[in-house]
Image (cartoon, rainbow, N blue to C red):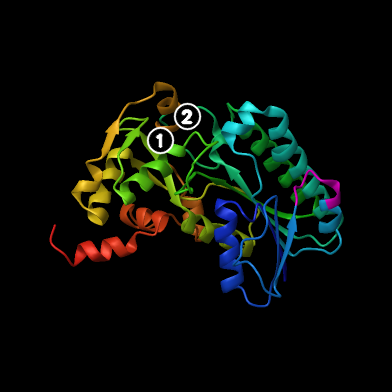
């Protein structure tokens, strides 16, 4: 099996690449990214292409031999896409459409797993959200993600590709410095809690978001590559308030760590990223997709803090 991962040196891409090279024997993996290959990413099974999908020479390299499975993760984050719309269009939309067209022309009908985003939903009411919720993107990033979802579905309808799009929520904990993402406070909060640092949270304790660790996100991406299911899906995630996350962190790190968190709510940030309703992913759960099992597991998976939980379980508070 020949596998392509775009955005392979990104936050999720690195975790996915590691999983593929570790768990999927008998596969040849091509990583594509603007960055150089990480030092650990080497071996006969890995080929690295440094460049972007908006580069015609890169597309020609990708078209030299067919792929069986493609994970398309490469994108410009929402904040930067909003600030630089021409760049956002070139990378998030035009380059994605060019990649799908290239894969379709191979006549190999590869499986394509597209990392879409909950940004496609736009402003949310308090009604539960599912993959069937009307997409009304309110930012350029979400609009481009929705356009690529439609293109992927059309290629699948025509029989050129076997496509599945996953609308990923806020994935934690992105490495510092966390920039370009409106939901950056989610990762910053977890980093501060795990390091015992002071942190001023830009949303209130009651603010709610959908949380998913990178580990769980990779689990869902790998499953999507294996399933004989096409379409757009909403992976499960934990709907948690900031207060719930901080309270659960006490189990892992102790009371002193949570005492460093204070709040200075920004109404604009909270309105967009801190008022998420219930998530209805019952259909996806039935297919085997999953969120982190608990708040504590989400934090542990996100910041690699399981050792702290074990330590706290065996020592007095």
Q: Residues within 10 Å of mark 1 (few under 14, many from 20)?
A: some
Quarter occupied by residue 55: top right
The residue that label 2 is drawn on is 124
- Frontmost residue, 134 versus 123: 123
The residue that label 1 is drawn on is 277
Disc 1 secondary structure class: loop
x and y percentages locating residue 173 in the rendered image = 44, 49
x and y percentages locating residue 21 in the rendered image = 61, 70
Q: Which image quarter is the N terminus in?
A: bottom right
> Seen in the image, is 309 located left or right of residue 36?
left
Q: Which residues are magenta?
A: 51-57
- Frontmost residue, 112 versus 257: 257
Q: Main secondary structure of the magenta part?
A: loop
Quarter occupied by residue 118: top right
Q: Is residue 53 magenta?
A: yes
- Frontmost residue, 121 versus 134: 121
Q: Are marks 2 and 1 in contact (CB under 8 Å)?
A: yes
Residue 262 drawn above or below residue 193: above
- Frontmost residue, 159 versus 118: 118
């Amino acid at each position: 099996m020949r596998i392509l991962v775009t955005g392979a040196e990104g936050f999720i891409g690195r975790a996915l690449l590691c999983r593929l090279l570790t768990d999927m024997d008998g596969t040849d993996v091509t990583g594509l990214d603007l960055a150089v290959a990480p030092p650990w990413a080497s071996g006969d099974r890995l080929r690295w292409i440094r460049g972007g999908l908006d580069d015609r020479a890169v597309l020609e390299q990708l078209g030299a031999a067919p792929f069986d499975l493609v994970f398309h993760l490469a994108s410009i984050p929402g904040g930067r896409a909003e600030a630089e719309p021409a760049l956002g269009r070139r990378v998030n939309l035009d380059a994605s459409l060019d990649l799908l067209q290239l894969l379709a022309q191979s006549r190999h009908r590869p499986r394509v797993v597209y990392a879409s985003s909950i940004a496609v939903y736009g402003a949310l009411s308090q009604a539960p959200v599912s993959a069937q919720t009307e997409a009304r993107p309110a930012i350029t990033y979400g609009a481009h993600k929705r356009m690529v979802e439609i293109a992927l579905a059309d290629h699948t309808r025509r029989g050129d590709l076997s496509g599945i799009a996953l609308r990923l929520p806020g994935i934690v904990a992105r490495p510092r410095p966390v920039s370009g993402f409106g939901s950056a406070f989610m990762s910053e909060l977890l980093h501060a809690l795990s390091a015992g640092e002071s942190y001023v949270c830009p949303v209130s304790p009651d603010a709610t978001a959908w949380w998913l660790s990178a580990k769980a996100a990779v689990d869902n991406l790998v499953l999507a590559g294996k399933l004989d299911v096409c379409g757009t899906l909403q992976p499960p995630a934990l709907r948690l308030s900031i207060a719930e996350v901080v309270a659960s962190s006490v189990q892992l790190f102790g009371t002193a760590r949570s005492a460093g968190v204070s709040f200075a709510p920004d109404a604009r940030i909270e309105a967009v990223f801190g008022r998420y309703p219930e998530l209805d992913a019952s259909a996806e759960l039935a297919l085997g997709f999953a969120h982190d099992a608990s708040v504590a597991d989400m934090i542990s998976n996100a910041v690699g803090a399981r050792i702290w939980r074990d330590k706290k379980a065996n020592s007095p508070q």
